[in-house]
Amino acid sequence: MNMPTPLIKANNLWKKYGSNVVLERLNLTVNAGEFITMVGTSGCGKSTFLKMLLGMEEPTSGKLLLDGKQIPNEPDQSRGIVFQQYSVFPHLTVLENVIIAREFEHSPFIGKLFGGKKQQVIDEAKLLLESIGLTAALKKYPHELSGGMKQRLAIAQALIRQPRILLLDEPFGALDPGIRADMHQLILKLWREHNLTVFMVTHDLSEGFYLGTRLWVFDKLRRDPHAPEAYGASITYDLPITRNKIMPTELQATQLQTTQMQEA
C-alpha cells in the first residue's frame, strides 16, 4: 500500500550565513492538517525555518520539499504568513487591506480589479472579516484599531488568498493575556474551518502545547564554547499532542449536557 506524500519534508537540511551555522541536519515530515508549534531560545533558527518554508530564504544544503517538490524560492499563494508586528497598510481601511492581497494576486503590476471580479473579491473579504469579528470595523483605518484587531486583520490578509499553509511568527507576543486567549480560539477555529496546515513560532511553552498537534523544540545538539556559531540548531524534541482542544461554545454545550444528565 502506497503511503501518501507528506505535505512538507526536510532531508538533511542546513542553513548557514557565512561561517555562522543556524540550522543543521533537519530531517522531518509534516502531513496536511497538522498544527506545528515551535519553541526554543532566541537565535536557534525557528524564524529562519519559517522563512525557508515561505520561500524568503533558501537552504544552504539539503532539501525542503512541498508535495515532494523543492519549495519555490519566493512566496506564493499556497503559503500565507502573519508576523508579530502587524503587516498592514496604514493608509488603507480594514476592507481595503484585505482586498489588496487578492488584487495583487490577480493583477500584480496594476494592483486593481474592476467590475464583477472586484465585487466578488469584496464579497469574499466581507465574509472573511465577518468570520474573524471585524465586520463593524470595515471602514476603519489601522490606527483606529486595537492590537488584537490589527492582528485579526493581518490574519485576514493571509487567509484571503486561501493558502494551504499558514505560517505564524510569534503572532500573539505583543498582545495582552486576555486578548491572546481570544486569538487562540480564533486561530483554532480558522485552522479547522479552512483545513490549514499551521507552523507557529512561540516563546510561550503553554501556548505551544495548547495550540499545537505537535510541538518542536529547537536547540543545539553540539556546542563549542570557543566558537559558538560553529554548530547550528536542530529539532531536539518532536512531541505529539493528542489532547482535544475544546472551543468555548463546545465546552459550554458539554457542560450543559452533563448538567441535564445529572438533573435527569
Image (cartoon, rainbow, N blue to C red):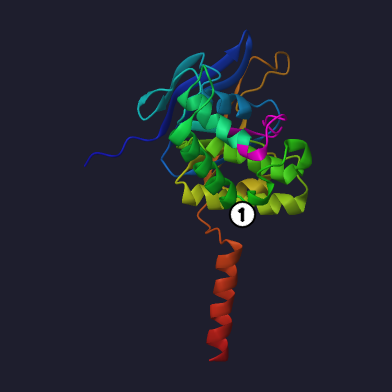
Residue at screen point 66% across, 49% down? 183
Q: Nearer the viewer, residue 23 or 124?
A: 124
Horizontal and vertical percent position of residue 44: 65, 27
Tell me the quarter of the image containing the N terminus: top left
Q: Does 30 sit left or right of 254 as displayed? A: left
Q: Is residue 64 magenta?
A: no
The amino acid type of the residue labelled 1 equals Gln
Residue 62 occupies quadrant: top left
Q: Nearer the viewer, residue 233 or 68?
A: 68
Q: Nearer the viewer, residue 100 or 18?
A: 100
Residue 231 occupies quadrant: top right
Q: Is residue 88 magenta?
A: yes
Magenta residues, start to end: 81-95
Horizontal and vertical percent position of residue 238: 53, 40
Residue at which label 1 appears: 185
Horizontal and vertical percent position of residue 54: 52, 26
